[in-house]
Image (tube, grey):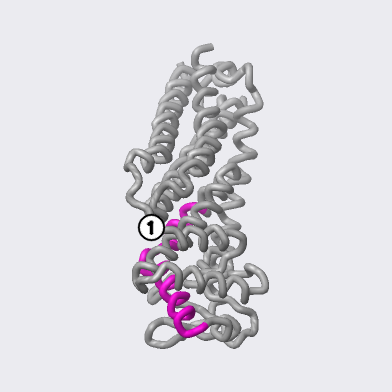
């Protein structure tokens, strides 16, 4: 049936094809774009793709419910007409219910985890929002809010020189002033909705750290100083145990890559067309989701005749 192939095309495009394409696009664009602009394009595009994918799952879940004879009898339509629409792939509507349940559970779990993490952060701080915590483990991270705070342990402070500590604060302050937490949350929600976007979420975190590195280097007028501060902070840290979604200057395995980028001259502006690649994929997915919605409405109208 023509309707069957169209409905399945929508499912394949928005749920199966586009998310991996976004991953490939981000991998290729990684260090070709300015970090902050790239983080914005990638994070919001990933969220749009995830939303389109999730909405497709909702549509196919409704399709599955509409196949139930009791539902068809109550609403006065032919469940046979609905079933025949996906007769060759009868598992897709029911698989969509399982995937949708997973996405909802993952979203709720991540939202609750985020609230728990924020509740663990100490209040207070000086006039500049700096909160010093008596802890031998070297850690530092930015906490979004009104006002935002920068949490630094005594272990981290003792590991850095005055200038390196200044660079660390400039880095963390960049996270707060440029509202990087919004991009991190967008990427995290995208990952929760579609596991295939996990790598994109990790890369948004990397781009956010790179953006803070570049902002700190510009504010202090020294790329090498920021590079040394990041390296010293990473060496001082025992393990990357920063609370989830709170940005740390010394985050894990990407440190050598970030330091290497800082030790290179600042690159010029990338062609704007490159930013359009993930955005175009997201828009295409949204358009196809809109068409899928119309197809399902037409199917229900046909089943009601």
Q: Quadrant of residue 253?
A: bottom right
Q: Position of residue 120 (x, y in %)?
A: 57, 76
- Corner quadrant of residue 235: bottom right
- Residue named by callout 1: 266
Q: Quadrant of the C terminus?
A: top left
For this orientation, the residue located farthest to the top is: 1
- Residue found 63% across the figure and 45% down from its top: 102
Helix or strand or loop: what does disc 1 sit on?
loop
Q: Quadrant of residue 149?
A: bottom left
Q: Is residue 51 above or below residue 212?
A: above
Q: Is residue 58 visible?
A: no
Q: Position of residue 241 (x, y in %)?
A: 63, 69
Membership of 36 in magenta stretch: no
- Viewer-closest of 126 and 158: 158
The residue nearer to you, when weighing 248 against 85, is 248
Which residue occupies 38% across, 76% down?
147
Q: Who's the residue at 46% across and 49% down the image?
A: 31
Q: Quadrant of the N terminus?
A: top right
Point out the stretch of residues depicted in magenta: 161-187
């Amino acid at each position: 049936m023509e309707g069957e192939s169209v409905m399945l095309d929508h499912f394949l495009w928005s749920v199966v094809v586009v998310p991996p394409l976004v991953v490939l696009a981000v991998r290729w664009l990684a260090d070709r774009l300015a970090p902050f602009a790239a983080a914005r394009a990638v994070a919001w595009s990933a969220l749009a793709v995830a939303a389109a994918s999730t909405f497709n799952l909702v549509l196919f879940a409704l399709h599955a419910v509409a196949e139930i004879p009791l539902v068809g009898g109550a609403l006065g339509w032919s469940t046979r007409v609905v079933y025949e629409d996906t007769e060759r792939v009868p598992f897709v509507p029911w698989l969509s219910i399982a995937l949708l349940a997973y996405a909802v559970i993952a979203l709720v779990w991540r939202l609750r985890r985020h609230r728990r993490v924020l509740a663990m952060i100490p209040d207070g701080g000086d006039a500049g929002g700096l909160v010093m915590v008596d802890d031998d483990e070297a850690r530092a991270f930015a906490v979004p809010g009104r006002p935002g705070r920068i949490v630094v342990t005594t272990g981290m402070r003792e590991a850095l020189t005055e200038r390196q500590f200044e660079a660390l604060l400039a880095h963390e302050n960049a996270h707060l002033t440029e509202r990087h937490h919004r991009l991190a949350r967008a990427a995290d929600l995208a990952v929760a909705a579609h596991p295939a976007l996990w790598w994109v979420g990790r890369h948004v975190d990397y781009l956010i750290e790179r953006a803070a590195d570049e902002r700190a280097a510009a504010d202090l007028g020294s790329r090498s100083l920021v590079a040394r501060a990041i390296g010293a902070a990473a060496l001082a840290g025992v393990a990357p145990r920063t609370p989830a979604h709170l940005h740390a200057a010394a985050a894990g395995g990407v440190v050598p890559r970030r330091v290497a980028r800082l030790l290179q001259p600042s690159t010029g502006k990338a062609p704007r067309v490159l930013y359009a690649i993930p955005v175009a994929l997201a828009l295409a997915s949204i358009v196809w989701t809109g068409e899928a919605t119309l197809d399902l409405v037409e199917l229900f109208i046909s089943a009601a005749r």
